[in-house]
Amino acid sequence: MNDATLYSSILIVGTSAAVFAAMCSSWFTAAEHQGDDDTRHRMRLCEGVATLVTLAQGVAASHHLGRSTPLFVSIALCALFVSGFEYAIAHAAAINPNKAINTNSSINTISSINAIVRR
């Protein structure tokens, strides 16, 4: 691998990470959202746009260099990022109604008092 191919591949790694970060939320944020249809649709739409931009960068770099390595790097990155988002979407956090609420907190006590007074 010559220097130009290596440098362009490194640039594709950085820019694709930036593109996916700009278009999509983080994997952690995706996992915290409820798995409703609207959220999944918007996240997949963002995945698609970020994939197109990343692949276009790979195609442009490969065309410029006359080598296919940058294209394969961009394909691998898209697979990595999209699979991470799909995993996060599939394993979204669920609301736990049995989660204990700290009633010793002054905020909860004040809120309870205000709720009683308002009624």
Image (cartoon, rainbow, N blue to C red):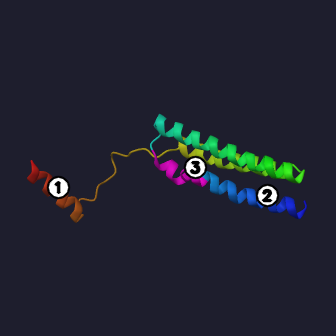
Which residue is pictured at 19% across the width and 57% down the height? 111
Q: Mark 1 or mark 3, which is nearer to you?
A: 3
Image coords of residue 46 (percent x, y): 58, 43
Q: Residue furthest top?
A: 37
Amino acid on which disc 3 is placed: Met
* Location of residue 17 (image quadrant): bottom right
Residue at figure coordinates x 87%, y 64% from the top left:
3
| Residue 9, disc | 2
Specify which label sits upstream in the sequence, 1 or 3: 3
Q: Is the residue under label 2 in contact with that under label 3 (CB below 8 Å)?
A: no
Mark 3 surroundings within 10 Å by alpha-carbon count, few (fewer than 14), some (14 through 19), many (20 or more):
some
Q: Is residue 104 visible?
A: no
Give the left or right position of residue 4, taking residue 117 as reference.
right
x%, y% of residue 71? 80, 48
Q: Amino acid at mark 1?
A: Ser
Q: Quadrant of the N terminus?
A: bottom right
Q: CA distance from mark 1 to mark 3?
A: 41 Å
Kindly identify the residue that appears in the image at 43 percent across and 44 percent down.
94
Task: Name the residue nearer the viewer: 7 or 109.
Answer: 7
Distance Cα–Cα, label 3 vs label 2? 21 Å
Which tag, 3 or 2, sits closer to the chain's start? 2
Give the mark count: 3
